[in-house]
Amino acid sequence: MNVSEIMVRKPVFVELPATREDVLSALIRNKRTGMPVIDNGGKVLGTITRKDIFQNPGEQQVAVIMNWDTPTVSASTPVEKAARLMFEENQRRIPVVKKGKLVGLLTPTDLLKVIEKNKVEKPVEEYLRSQPTYIYAGTPANVAAQMMNLSKVYAMPVLDKEGRLCGLITDRDLFDLKYLGENISLTTLGISEDEDAWTWEGLRNVMNLYYQEAKIQLPSDPVSKFMTKELSTLYRRTPAHEGARVMRVNDFDQVPIVDKDDNIMNMLYDMDLLRALLD
């Protein structure tokens, strides 16, 4: 199977020269967390993600904060080779090019479909690599946001006072319209009130940036108020293809691995599961 069979054929992109606001607008409008960067001739120059922006909150020019060393593949590249490149380079978005010009985009979700289709039977425990960063359910939301920004870990399993898994929190969860809506001014954030392109789901992807710039405040309510409580979990002996299916269907980047008593053992990350295509 080649990349052409699974790639996104009409990816969202930003063209240089561009500003941070151009990227934020595109991310919000299209509910994305990153995209390729091209020149005015369609040539791929690199990629930019919301994390790049989070880590450079004061920088305006995309050319300064983007990743210029993004690897690329062609439409005829075998999916196994593309998966190895994505895993080894730790790149969640690989532009697909033809004569250097953007023709598609490859993401972990696209490759999860291949793992599922190939019915990879090896258990998910063979693809566990990263140790997760945990957080206590009583941690105040504003402290949680600071922990995420300092550790650069934007999704954490939540433990209760007995040390048992009780939820999952991401930076997106912390910025919940139910609790922040009345305190958010789109004008203050630099977004037009009458812009029909923005949606709350898209805005949540980049709200952390506005928090870092002190344009909004998070409450001191505990993480348990914001976390996702209904979790999909896997056992360590679950086949890789089933793990891939759960991630793909639910659009998850990570899934908790639990034992028979539902005690958390680890987290399975989509990037680590890509190794199922490298065996």
Image (spheres, helix red, strand yellow):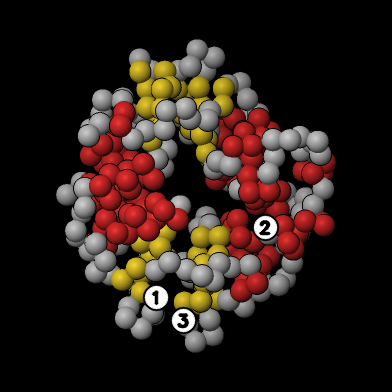
* Vertical arrangement, residue 214 with respect to residue 75, above or below: below
Figure quadrant of residue 235: bottom left
Relative image position of residue 176 (x, y in whole percent): 68, 59
How packed is label 3: few (under 14 Cα within 10 Å), some, or many (20 or more)? some
Q: Secondary structure at mark 2?
A: loop
Give the residue at mark 3.
164
Query: Quick one: which residue is furthest to the top in this view?
Result: 41
Task: Say the numbered circle drawn on residue 238.
Answer: none
Q: Are marks 1 and 3 in contact (CB under 8 Å)?
A: yes
Residue, disc 2:
175
Distance, label 3 to label 2, CA atoms, is 24 Å
Location of residue 14 in the rendering, given as x and y in whole percent from the top left corner: 56, 27
Residue indicated by mark 1: 264
Residue at x 36%, y 61% (from the top left corner): 268
User: Which residue corresponds to the image point at 17% horizontal and 49% vertical from the top-left?
Assistant: 279
The tag earlier along the polypeptide, 3 or 2, is: 3
Compared across the picture, whether 70 is left or right of 139 comes to left
Q: Does label 2 or label 1 sit earlier along the sequence? A: 2
Alpha carbons under labels 2 and 1: distance apart: 26 Å
Quarter holding residue 183: bottom right
Answer with the quarter of the image where residue 272 lies.
bottom left
Q: Is residue 130 visible?
A: no
Q: Amino acid at mark 2?
A: Phe
Residue 189 in sight: yes
First in residue order: circle 1 vs circle 3: 3
Q: Residues within 10 Å of mark 1 (few under 14, many from 20)?
A: many
On screen, residue 71 above or below 49: above
Q: Amino acid at mark 1?
A: Ile
Above or below for 61 versus 116: above
Q: Amino acid at mark 3?
A: Arg
